Amino acid sequence: MPSDVSEKGLETLICEAMTAVAAPDGDGAALRERSSLYGTGWVAGDAKDYDREYAIDLAQLRSFLRDTQRETAAALDLDDNSPTRQKFLARLQGEITRRGVIDVLRHGIKHQAYAIDLFYGPPTPGNQKAAERFTQDRFSVTRQLRYSRDETRLALDVVIFINGLPIATFELKNSLTKQTVDDAIEQYKRDRDPRELLFQFGRCAVHFAVDDQQVYFCTELKGKASWFLPFNRGRNDAAGNPPNPDGLKTDYLWKRILTREGLTDILENYAQIVTAKNPKTGKETKSQIYPRYHQLDVVRKLLADAADQGAGKRYLVQHSAGSGKSNSIAWLAHQLIGLQREGAPVFDSIIVVTDRRLLDKQIRDTIKQFAQVSSTVGAVTEGAVQLKQFIESGKKIIISTVQKFPEVLKVLESMGSGHQGRRFAIIIDEAHSSQGGNTTASMNRVLAGGGDDDDTLEDKVNRIMEGRKMLPNASYFAFTATPKNKTLEIFGEPYEAGGQVKHRAFHSYTMKQAIQEGFILDVLQNYTPINSYYRLIKTVEADPEFDTKRARKKLRYYVESNDHAIRLKAEIMVDHFHEQVLALRKVGGQARAMVVTSGIERAIQYFVAFRDYLSARESTYKAIVAFSGEHEFGGEKVTEASLNGFPSSRIAEEIQEDPYRFLICADKFQTGYDEPLLQTMYVDKVLSGIKAVQTLSRLNRAHPQKDQVFVLDFMNDTDTIQAAFADYYRTTILSEETDENRLHDLKAALDGYQVYSEEQIDALVTLYLGGADRDKLDPILDACVATYNQELNEDGQVDFKGKAKAFNRAYGFLASILPYTNAGWEKLSICLTFLVPKLPAPREDDLSKGILESIDMDSYRVEKQAVQEVQLPDEEAEIDPVPMTGGGHKQEPELDSLSNILKTFNDQFGAIPWGDGDRIGKLITEDIPARVAADSAYQNAKQQDDAQNARIEHDMALQRVVNAFMQDDTQFFKEFSDNESFRKWVTEMSFALTSS
């Protein structure tokens, strides 16, 4: 007989895999009870046992209650269709409607004089009675279930039940018959009426659309508005599923996820109904949550490894924006409380460090499903006294912001060694911003327990060194979307490849997968750079000299901040938003825009320009400005609140409501701000690296009516933005470990300057660790400063101070991960911590001062380039370890006359006699230097402080960059190749712009 490749054949395959027996399809004879369970622990249900009036499998419910609560089952008269049974079933249906099937399974129901259990959860180790009860739960799978009371021929492919209560429905499709998961989703939306009892909110935990390639799920059917999410494993950091050598790509769903134990774990620890209140209307809305595949996978793998390894390990989770990190962290924190190893708790306390206010609520909502929140969770909002009360009252989860975390550490330290022997799990949200070196050292020292008052200097130094290390009594769980090199080396898993020890995340869910699965949008799909062209004129008769490099920076800032330039750019932004966003009803006509500026002054300039131009256009919309503190503008002190007309705390809420459509920011709302209505971004700030990724990613939050976003960038180019995002598009890997021998080299170089002596270091450290008054430390430090001033020339001072900073920066990082300690390093670090702030910086006169008073802007124009879809490399990104260089020498200013500086500046930006002088000017002064500066060989040469080698590598990098223009810009390439003076001028210009 040939293979059955029909949809019915897929049903058979699934049901037989779950039950290991041929399941009835609803038309054949019923399969009666069996004495044992097969497959993944399910029994085959019969569609004829389904009661459409109450949406339950009456036969399975009756069997469960008979086996587990015989007297109650008899009293409920379940065998007969009597008024007694009808009252019970009506009560059960009402409770499911009110509370949802998940809560009813967890807590049962009360009916008349009876407390009725409807599910027995998994047993704790050694609890034999609970283990026996768990085996009595009846997990059943039913094919071709006719569910409708009115349309009696309508049937679902598969429905699964626990003790007769429906848990999940399935629509199956088969790509071999040219139907896919998309058809299954469409069938749910078109044919499954959400008014039917089985499809009402909370009646089932989840609805699955499945084919042989992909799995999607939905927690609430709403007709055409039903939102189906992927439940796929991912493949090569992207969407979809990998090939399965042992079966269908999607059989993980019924073979691994929906086992008795697997589904029970989801219902006990993940699935839930949460309530949200609208802060303005007070209206409450309920939503049902079911974990996505990667959320379930990461939490289960972290728990399994922590249970196996015990306390003392570090984990890095690289999960993109849109991954649902908040829920993952909440589920992890809740389950770490009860995690056991060899019968004892793995952790005594869970500390969550986060800057997200919503995370506290999400953790509370999660815990509320399983325990009393007030006795379990404590959020540090009022400081030390509150925290001490939390610890003494036995709070299991303590939530702290990064700002409050130092207070947490101080309280723990003040409590002495009472917490010695305790074990901690520390969950760090956005690890790269929460894990400063000093905070890490303090945390580790505190959690290790206190020392004795009579410790010797050696004892104290050794304790500090041990405190810097990741401790055996604490496990660290670090979550971030954009791991820096330091984060990877501290928390990442080491592995060997190509003779190098590299580091990678314990678990990853990439930006690429999140985009392909539709959880975030691709912010680079419509990226448009804008070029600025301008001409400056000299307004003084004299021709003074200025520092060329500083002058160029000031001139560029002057041009871009000039009132005329700001007005012109503001008009472009407002016109674009009205004509290309509002007119096209982006995000259903609700779209908002963010304007990213380089500072407070420019943000206020834009706010005024937007206000005036919106008024001139007779637009009904307004802008909001966001910046910190008080600033002087137009001769008066202003704040964001005084300009906006409402408190700063309401900015995030007000931008969601008309008339506000523009959010103008100066270093606010550029990280951690989630607003799905943001559709357009106007960038007037230099961005690169992780800052570029975090800033542009404010646009990526999904919205049902948001299918694309738009970036108009006045300051950056495509190559810079592409390079920034490439590091985090797929999994990020640390290319090699930091070389700790550089610390030996730095210490030797510092010792060689003889600014301090070993005796001075020992004396200073002894006084400091002994708690001496401040006036006892200063004489030693001042003596070192005097030596620094008298014995070192300017270059020596620059080199010493640079190397001192590099030593402290590197030691603060490496000390936490090295497998050994070095007392000499620790004492020098303590000494330099106090010495460096006292060292005066070499005097540097601003030889560009006065240039802005000597010039004026003659013309300014902007030119919009073509909209581009920036393509990111489809490969894992490797980033270099923390740089271990320091020192250097004082840069001598390069002086030139004002007229020459302006001539060069205008030649580059507005008066070169080429076919397109504006484009060539930008090529020479921005595009080429940016690409040369990004050359890895050139970067390495600069880090080694070898000027000669750096120049050689620069010239080679420049030639590689120019060669790349051979086809795209033959005129420039020919001029560079044939004209020696032009080539020399471009080379010097590039080196001057990239060498500092």
Image: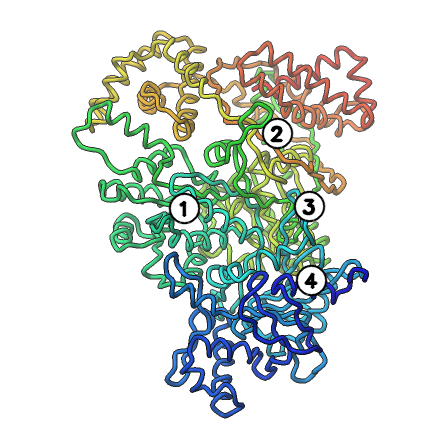
> Badge 4: few (under 14), some or many (20 or more) residues near its Cα, within 10 Å?
some
What crowding class fits label 3: few (fewer than 14 Cα within 10 Å), some (14-19), or many (20 or more)? some
Structural crowding at the residue carrying mark 1, measured as other residues with C-alpha within 10 Å and reported as few (<14), some (14–19) or many (≥20)? many
Q: Establish if 554 lies above or below 684.
A: above
Figure label count: 4
Rounded to the nearest angstrom, the CA distance separating label 1 from label 2 is 41 Å
> Label 1 is placed on what type of residue?
Val
Along the viewing direction, whichever of 46 and 849 lies nearer the viewer: 46
Helix, strand or loop under label 1: strand
Residue at 72% across / 22% down in the picture? 961
Q: In 3D space, how far apart are the residues under numbered discs 3 and 1 (Cα atoms)?
A: 42 Å
Q: Is residue 721 above or below residue 103?
A: above
Residue mark closest to the camera, 4 vs 3: 4
Give the residue at x 77% y 17%.
Answer: 976
Structural crowding at the residue carrying mark 2, measured as other residues with C-alpha within 10 Å and reported as few (<14), some (14–19) or many (≥20): few
Mark found first going from the N terminus, 1 or 2: 1
Q: CA distance from mark 3 to mark 2?
A: 20 Å
**Label at residue 572:** 3
Q: Which mark is residue 556?
A: 2
Q: Secondary structure at mark 4?
A: helix
